[in-house]
Image: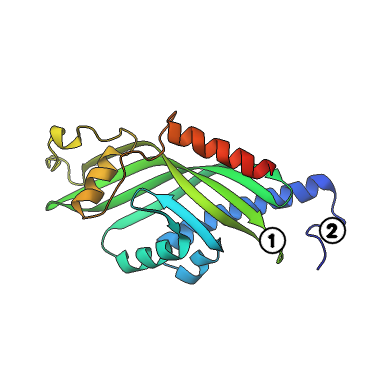
Amino acid sequence: MSEPHAGMPRDAAEDADLTAVRRLIEAWGFRRDAGEWEALADTFHPEGSIAVSWYGPGPFAGFVAACRANRGKTFSKHAMCGSRVTFRGPRAVAETDVLLFMRGAVQGVEVVGQTNMRFLDRIERRGDGAWRILDRTAIYDHDMMAPAISGTALPVAPDALTGLPPGYRFLAWRLRLAGRTVPDDLPTPGSKAEATLRREAAAWLAA
């Protein structure tokens, strides 16, 4: 099998890789939200893993299965807002700004929510020449929740949010009400967890 971009000028090859990785990341959002499960599974390598608020770290195949099982219970939409990517040969580390929108009923009240987060991905190009994600971890920057109908009271007492991390307090509260487990120490801006992620990603890229 020939090398990817064989005979292509270096700048053109780098642009092609950057375009491919950005398209991969964008495709993940569309496929996840559209319920295109087989296509979604193909965005990761077979042994790939993911860690988000309600799942993981664990196999991406399990994440896909859980998303399929929960489809339709609430509305959610991922807006992939832009990525910065660092390459080293067939490896890349990408950081992507993501807006997660949700709408659904919480304790009988229809609410809307928004979570600002970043995906930190380790990505590899292997034998077939395609870039796929090896692992992904979400870093939680900020979230909010409001009643969908103006004038309706938000069904949460202030003390119910006490102690929840500000980067994802409303998300954690809502998911825990739904019976899901959400850790208290997910990566947030400037946290030890974020620093560890970055250090491990840099070491992997340099290896």
Quadrant of the image containing the C terminus: top right
Q: Tell me the element at label 1.
A: loop
Q: Tell me the element at label 2.
A: loop
Q: Tell whether 103 sits left or right of 57.
A: left
Indicate the quadrant where residue 198 lies. Answer: top right
Query: Which amino acid, mark 2?
Result: Ala
In the rendered view, would you say 129 is above or below 111? below
Quadrant of the image containing the N terminus: bottom right
Comparing 79 with 168, the one in front is 168
Sequence-wise, the earlier of marks 2 and 1 is 2
Residue at 46% over, 60% down: 59
In the rendered view, would you say 168 is above or below 109? above
Residue at 32% over, 68% down: 69
Furthest-top residue in this view: 190
Furthest-bottom residue in this view: 38
Mark toward the viewer: 2 or 1: 1
Q: CB atoms at circles 2 and 1 under 8 Å apart?
A: no
Q: Which residue is mark 2?
A: 6
Residue 124 percent across, percent down from the top left: 64, 55
Residue 28 percent across, percent down from the top left: 50, 57
On residue 126, the disc is 1
